[in-house]
Amino acid sequence: MDIQLSGLVVITGNYGSGKTEIAINLAAYRKIQGIDVRVADLDLVNPYFRTREARKQLAEIGIEVVLPPEQYMHADLPILTRTVSGLIRNPSALTILDVGGNDVGAAVLAALEDAFKTVSCKMLQVVNPFRPLTQTIEGAIDMRHSIEKTSRLKVTGLIGNANLIDESTLETILSGYDFIRKLSEKTGAPLEFITVPSHLLAELDIEQFSCPVLPIKRQLVPPWKKLTRLTAP
């Protein structure tokens, strides 16, 4: 099954859930499928591991990343509001908004409330059951409610991102899939897709999953680690 997301997609979740890696890889995946993609970096909380750190890799495959002016690149200020309002009202085939973690990061969405009133969008909650606060179904639901209350938007679907970074195994993926499937059944929120580290993909039978699978090629890595290039066919 292919991921067919289009229109306006907001990626949200708790700190460390992997939102930004997913935003980057989802953008590349859909671009390689042949659609126009733009990404807006709305993470105004975490000064590290933001979409802007992968702007060179994304530009190489023709994806525009909307960023603050260079002099404000590392400022945690809501300076994207006017530009992002335009993106929201006139999205490309796929426009991804990468939002900061927890309710604090989601607050920027409330500042864009007027723009959201004129369009329909999907807000997807990334859930990694191996992270604090979302290790239980109840914890993941509490996180969802907190984000919804602050952002004034409703979560419309889920993304399962079960991983332990370099220690991820097939068991990690399968356990996480079981968790996110139960969360989907409990909440009624559809499971849009799960992620799998690209180096583990060949070892998995993806037919066992009832949803699409997004291969993750890590882009946000420490300087001493080599990233896997995002490439187009």
Image: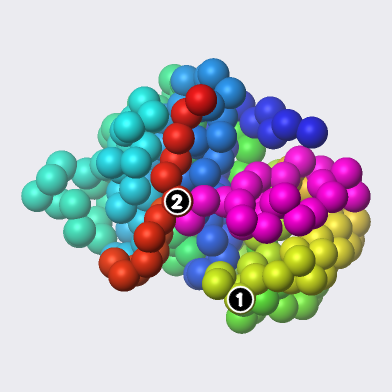
Disc 1 marks a residue whose amino acid type is Glu
Residue that appears at 31% across and 70% down: 224
The residue under label 1 is 167
| Residue, far left | 71
Disc 2 marks a residue whose amino acid type is Thr
Residue 169 % position (x, y): 70, 70
Tell me, yes or no, if residue 131 can be seen here.
yes
Part of the protein shown in magenta? 194-218
Q: CA distance from mark 2 to mark 1?
A: 17 Å
Residue that appears at 77% across and 77% down: 136
Task: Specify the quadrant that holds the N terminus.
Answer: top right
Tell me, yes or no, if residue 140 can be seen here.
no
Magenta span includes 98: no
Q: In the rendered view, how is the structure colored?
A: rainbow
* Mark identifier at residue 57: none
Residue that appears at 36% across and 56% down: 50
Q: Secondary structure at mark 1?
A: helix
Q: Is residue 196 left or right of residue 64?
A: right
Q: Is residue 170 left or right of residue 85?
A: right
Picture layout, residue 149 above or below residue 92: below
> Foreground: 217 or 70?
217
* Mark identifier at residue 228: 2
Crowd band around label 2 with a 10 angstrom C-alpha radius: few (<14), some (14–19), many (20+):
some
Picture layout, residue 216 above or below residue 1: below
Quarter where residue 9 is shown: top right
Q: Is residue 112 left or right of residue 186?
A: left
